[in-house]
Amino acid sequence: MLKIIAAALMLIDHLGMVFFQDQFGYRIIGRLSMPIFAYCVAQGFYKTTSYEKYFERMGVFAIVSQIPFWMMMYVTNPVYFNFMHFNIGFTFLGALCTLRLYKTIRNHTCDNKMINILGINVILILTTLLRCDYGAYAICLVLVFYEFYIMRKDILLTFIMLAAATFSLFFIGRADQIKVQLLGLPAFLIIIALKDLPLKQFKYFFYIFYPLHMLVLSFIKWVQ
């Protein structure tokens, strides 16, 4: 259910980005989607019986989604279009790698903790330099949900750390985004309320919806 809600919020966000750039209300509503997706990735990692299959599925999703993502970015603002801009699937691939490294540190099962810490930092830097959508910020949200909400089950500390992760945008040169992304924090209330409502028959819904909706929006923009 959470993925359906997050997808609907993302659609509103992208409608505003593509068609109503002078109406900020769409983007405000859209800020609620990223924290929900970040939680879903953390929960998916926690529950999966095969990390390799989960990673492979996310990789295929990221690759398939890239051309629709470029198309949507181009029709939104062709002047500032850049091929060095990658969709959220690549960000979540980085998040899964980060969680894998972090889990070994947390469980004291790694031979060299410093190498794993270095690996996490390399992932955060790469996702930022390669302009993966939401980049290091999204990965930090995934880590926060995994450690403080899923593992520790501490609601207050999770909220504090989500806010801290948002303010960390200052350190990667995105201080201008802090106020905007803070608008997404109420999404945590949606997660708390609906996290126990499964919808397994829509397990692959987002993998199809994400590239498809970008193709549709791009086509509509082109024919206008």
Image (cartoon, rainbow, N blue to C red):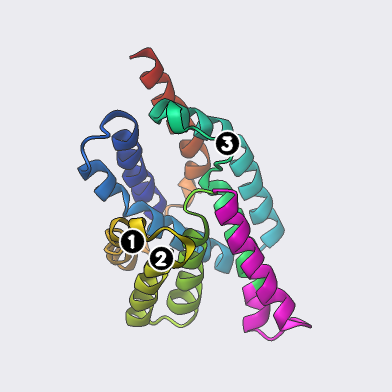
Q: Is residue 58 above or below residue 183?
A: above
Q: Is residue 68 left or right of residue 153?
A: right
Q: Amino acid at mark 1?
A: Ile
Highlighted range, magenta? 102-131
Q: Which residue is mark 3?
A: 66
Of the 4 image quadrants, the one containing the C terminus is: top left
List the residue tagged with mark 2: 170
Q: Earlier in the sequence, mark 2 or mark 3?
A: 3
Residue located 34% across and 77% down the image: 160
The residue tagged with tag 3: helix, strand or loop? helix
Going by the numbered disc 2, the residue's amino acid type is: Phe
The local secondary structure at tag 1 comes to: helix
Pointers 2 and 1 in contact (C-beta within 8 Å): yes
Tell whether label 1 touches label 3 (CB within 8 Å): no
| Badge 3 or badge 1: first in the primary sequence | 3
Residue 112 visible from this viewpoint: yes
Question: Which residue was labeled with disc 1?
Answer: 178
Above or below, 191 against 55 in this view is below
Q: Nearer the viewer, residue 8 or 201?
A: 8
Spatial CA span between label 2 and label 3:
28 Å
Instruction: Residue type at mark 3: give it.
Output: Gln
Q: Residues within 10 Å of mark 1 (few under 14, many from 20)?
A: some
Near mark 2 (Cα within 10 A), the count class, few <14, some 14-19 or many ≥20, is: few
Say which of marks 2 and 1 sits in front.
2
